[in-house]
Amino acid sequence: MSDSRRIGGSFRDPNGFVFVADGLVYRQVNEGYRSNYDQLMESDLYAELVDRALLIPHSEAGSNLSPDGQGYKILQPEQIPFISYPYEWSFSQLKDAALATLNIQRRALRHGMILKDASAYNIQFRHGKPLLIDSLSFETYQDGQAWVAYRQFCQHFLAPLVLMSRKDIRLSQLLRVYIDGIPLDLAKSLLPKRTWLNLGVVMHLHLHARAQQRYANKKPPAQSEPTSRRGRLDKKALMNICDSLRSTVNGLKWDPKSTSWARYYEGDSYREEGFDDKYRTVTEYLSIVKPDCLWDLGANTGAFSRIASDQGAFTVSIDSDPGAVEANYLQSIGLNETQLHPLLVDLTNPSAALGWANGERDSLAQRCKADCVLALALVHHLAIGNNVPLRNIAKYLAALAEWLIIEFVPKSDAKVKVLLASRQDIFADYTQSAFEDVFSEICEIVRSNSIQSSERRLYLMRRRPAGAS
C-alpha cells in the first residue's frame, strides 16, 4: 500500500471516501455500497453520464491502494486540476451546476437509480462545464420512495440562486457561512414579497420552508410513512419534481452589467494607446515562463487570462466582482473554452479553510499550486484601496507561485486618482522605487517594461530560492 491520506472533507459518507496516494486522487468504494456501485456500472447509467460529460470518468485501480484494506473497489477518477466551491462561483456557474444535477437525477431515474446526495460540493467544473465528481451519490430506486436529496438541492442550489436573482447577488456568500446549504427559513425571510408570484419559488422554497418549520421536531409524512398514499411518490411524480425545479431554475436571471467592474475597461486611462502594448508584453512574458497552471488575480472579465489559456495553461481567472466573473464565465461558455476557470474571490478576504476542524473545505492557497501569478492593475487596489502594505502584498503573491507578472500603477494614473479622490493620501511609500525594493527582497526582477502612452510598468519576477538574498 502506498502512503496515503484521506481528503479532509470526505468523512460523512459511510459508503466510501476520497484519498490521495502518490499525488493522485482516488475514491474507495466500501463493501456496503457494492450493490449500488454494481448497478451504476451495469445499468449503463455510468456510461451514459460519462458520455454526456455529466459524471467524472474513472478506472478501477488495484485494491492494494486501499488505506484500510477494506475497500470493495478503488476508483481512480480523472484528475480535476482545481477544486472550487459554490460560494466562489458566479450566478450562471451555480445555475449550470443546478441544472446539471437535475439532468443527472432524471437520467438516474430512467435507469432505476436515484441521487441520494444533491450537494453543490459534488459538482466541479471540468473543461469549463459542470459535472458530478461523486460516483457514490447514487442508490437503487425503490418504488414509492421520496427523493431524500430534495431538501439538500433546495438549500445548496435553489435558495442561493433565488436570493442572488431576486434580492442581492452578494447573498451567494451566505454559502460560506452555511456550508450545508442556506436554511430555507432564512432564505424565505430575506426574499421580497413579489417572489410569492412565482409558482416554483412558492412551492420549492416558501412552502418547503413552512413544511420544515412545521415538522421541525418530527419526521414529515413522506419520510415517516413511506407506504401511505400521502408519502408515496412514483417515478413519474419524481420526474415532475425535477421538471418543476428545472423550470424554476431556468426562469431565474441576473444581469452582470449591474456592477461597475464588469465595465472596467470602458474609458480606461491607457486603453487606446497602451492596451495592445500591454497585451504583447504579457504574451512575451508568458512565452518565457511557459506555465502549466496560472492564477490571474484581479482578472476582471479575463482578457489577459485568455493569453495564458490560449497558450495551453490551465488558468484560474479570479476577481471579486460578481458581474465581471459572470461575464467572464458566459464568454468562456460561448467560446467553448476548456482551460479557463472563472472564480469569485475577494483577495482581501480569500476563501479560508472551513467546516469540521477547519478541514472540510480547503483554503484557496491549499487547493492548487500555480506556476505563475498574473497581477495586472491589482497592487494599487490592495495598497491604496485596502491599506495593505507593499511588503505584505509581495510576500503573499510570492508564496502563491514561483513566477510573477505584475503591473505597477503610479499615483499619477487616472485609476489611482479615483481611489484617492475621496480619502487622504497617507501612502507616502507607494512609489515605483519602493515597489521594486520590496519585491526585490523576495524576487529577482527578470524583465521590466514600460507600457506605451502611460506611466505604468510591467515586471516579470521570479521568486528567490529559500535562503537566497
Image: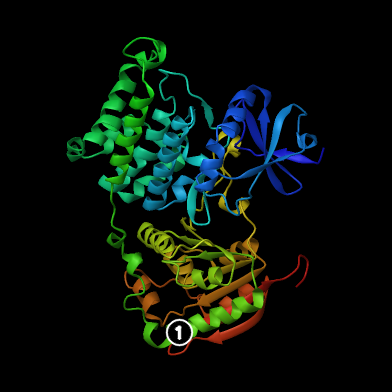
Q: Does 198 sit above or below residue 371?
A: above
Q: Is residue 128 left or right of residue 245?
A: right
Coloring scheme of the render? rainbow
Instruction: Identify the amino acid type marked 1.
Output: Asp
**Nearer-the-camera pick, 315 or 108:** 108
Callout 1 environment at 10 Å: few (<14), some (14 to 19), or many (20+)? some
Residue 21 in the image: state x and y as whole percent: 75, 43
Residue 182 visible in the picture: no
Viewport quadrant of the N terminus = top right
Residue displayed at 31% across by 65% down: 260
Q: Position of residue 192 (x, y in %)?
A: 21, 40
Q: Secondary structure at mark 1?
A: helix
Residue 368 position within the rendered picture, expressed as x and y whole percent measured from the top left: 62, 55
Q: Quadrant of residue 266?
A: bottom left
Residue to which mark 1 is pinned: 276
255, 221: nearer the viewer: 221
Which residue lies at the image location 40% right of the left edge and 29% below the top edge?
150
The image position of residue 255, as x and y in percent, is 28, 57
